[in-house]
Amino acid sequence: MKTPVQIAVTGAAGQITYALLFRLAAGDFLGPDQPVVLRLLEVPAAMDSMQGVVMELEDCAFPLLRGVVTTSDPRVAFENADYAFLVGAKPRGEGMERKDLLEVNAQIFSVQGKALNDVAHPDVKVLVVGNPANTNALIAQRNAPRLDPSNFSAMTRLDHNRSVSLLASHCSVPVTDIRRVIIWGNHSSTQYPDIHHAIVGGDRATSRVDRQWYETLFIETVQQRGSAIIKIRGKSSAASAANAALEHMRTWVAGTADGDWVSMVIPSDGSYGIEPGLMFSYPVTIEDGRHRIVQGLDIDDFSRRMLAATEAELKSERDAVAALL
Ligand code: NAI
């Protein structure tokens, strides 16, 4: 048996983690030969509730689960962490402005970035799920100068999966027939779900769908899917978000399939004219644990406008938290 890997998860009493932790402990992330230790972080007020989740983890008697650490101290949670799922975040409260939300989360992610910097494994892979995810990831990354910036990421995999599923259902094909969709930009309603380069079976997606459907219904449905679920379910997406977080990290470790890519928020290197350093969702291929932005895609005027809008939002988010960068 291999040495256990250390997986830190924040927001461990929340609803996404309730769907995520059991899959991590069952081996869905790193496979049936890799034991894990879960290092769970919560705010002090939620420690009791987190303890209930730990009791359930114990009751599963997962063979791969070699230990659970619970704490409200990020330096304990991230000690020697190989992987960090940063799910916990402050939700928007009654009467809270977007700027206040950005600031309160910026505080959380600057503290967590510093702790990762000081105590995590030097190659730790960090995924930020908690919103506003791109900007939270930017703050964590900027507060961790010891770590390679490319080890920080945020999640648009749920939006990517939603696009795959919607396109498959519209074209009446299985999801396995869909490749190369892209989510560009911010994990917010300005995100740009792009099917210009997507493949449906052996065809270009653009030859299978009506332009009008794509520009209006498809894009808006993906952008607004989170709100639509809250409206119907009364709660935000949890199991699908947990699944996407697991898939994001699994692909980062195992690599992308031949002929396909995934969407991932990573630091911009200036590709496609996006300001370097912004945490921006790009199409990436992954090999040996390293992601590379897919280069050379044609960007038409429509796409250029969509990219500019989501980049502008990310710049304004960044400017709102400039003091913590
Ligand atoms: P939740 O409210 O059920 O759980 C969040 C948990 O985080 C709470 O238990 C809270 O006590 C904890 N928390 C707050 N501050 C913390 C801190 N400083 N350290 C550790 N834990 C802390 O929320 P849920 O539904 O699990 O969602 C979590 C986050 O994920 C939210 O910000 C949500 O907007 C975001 N999200 C992101 C998605 C994406 O695609 N990127 C998709 C769905 C949700």
Image (cartoon, rainbow, N blue to C red):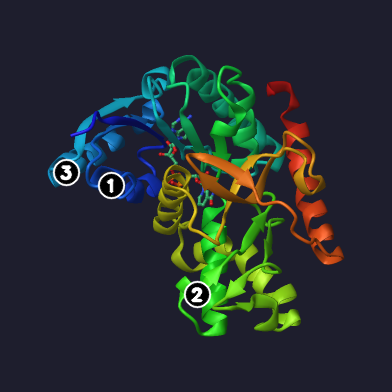
Name the side, left or right, on which 283 lies relative to 26.
right
The residue positioned farthest toward the right in the image shown: 301
The residue positioned farthest toward the top in the image shown: 118
**Mark 3 or mark 2, which has the lower sequence index?**
3
Q: Which amino acid does label 1 sit on?
A: Gly
The secondary structure type at the circle numbered 3 is loop
Q: Which residue is drawn at 71% across and 69% down?
A: 196
Give the residue at mark 3. 62
Using the rendered image of the protein, determine whether residue 76 is visible from the camera's viewpoint. yes
Give the residue at mark 2. 177
Identify the image quadrant of the N terminus.
Answer: top left
- The count of marks equals 3
The secondary structure type at the circle numbered 1 is loop
**Mark 1 or mark 3, which has the lower sequence index?**
1
Q: In this view, does 81 lie above or below 292?
A: above
Give the residue at mark 1. 31
Image quarter of residue 324: top right
Q: How crowded is mark 1: few (under 14 residues within 10 Å), some or many (20 or more)?
A: few
Closer-to-camera residue (34/312) = 34
